[in-house]
Image (cartoon, grey):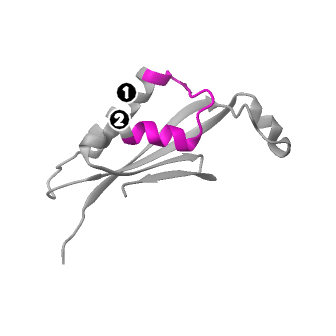
Amino acid sequence: MAERVTVICEVPIEGFHLWPDAVDEVRFLMHPHRHTFVIRMAFGVEHDDRDKEIFILRDMIRRFIGKHYGTPAQFGAMSCESIGRVLFEQFREMDVRWVEVWEETTGGARIDVV
């Protein structure tokens, strides 16, 4: 039986976003609001001896977000889904298997390889 092995890293990111077209029930989301976004990413590995080191991956993700969105991150009108897509595309060549972007631990989005 063939195996698919991944390493998974988790990166908390302080940031703000908003939903300009929020429906009436959640109209407050039209204004910038803060989250601790929790980014989880899985990367394929070929062997068991630090093929991709988790500390290095986390630093790469933090640097990318800081460079493009600042600290704390200013995501503007980006949803968890759109943040996840940006990260997926940025790290695609590193054999990213999936990306999750959560708002704290209450909900979020996942982008998978298909």
Say which element carries label 1: helix
Quadrant hosting residue 7: bottom left
Whether residue 18 is visible = yes
Rate crowding at label 2 as few (under 14), some (14 to 19) or many (20 or more) other CA atoms within 10 Å: few
Mark 1 or 2, nearer chain start: 1
In this picture, residue 104 sits left or right of residue 85: right
Total labels drawn: 2
Residue 85 image position (x, y, % from top left):
45, 41
Q: In the figure, 101 relative to 67: above or below?
A: below
Q: Is residue 76 magenta?
A: yes
Q: Which residues are magenta?
A: 68-88
* Quarter of the figure with the C terminus: bottom left
Label 1 to label 2: alpha-carbon separation: 12 Å
Quadrant hosting residue 103: top right
What's the residue at 74%, 35% (across, down)? 21
According to the picture, the residue beneath numbered tag 1 turns out to be 63
- Mark in the foreground, 1 or 2: 2
Q: In the image, what residue type sits under mark 2?
A: Gln
Rate crowding at label 1 as few (under 14), some (14 to 19) or many (20 or more) other CA atoms within 10 Å: some
In this picture, residue 86 sits left or right of residue 103: left
Contact (Cβ within 8 Å) of mark 1 with mark 2: no
Residue 60 image position (x, y, % from top left):
32, 33
According to the picture, the residue beneath numbered tag 2 turns out to be 90
Q: Residue furthest right?
A: 24
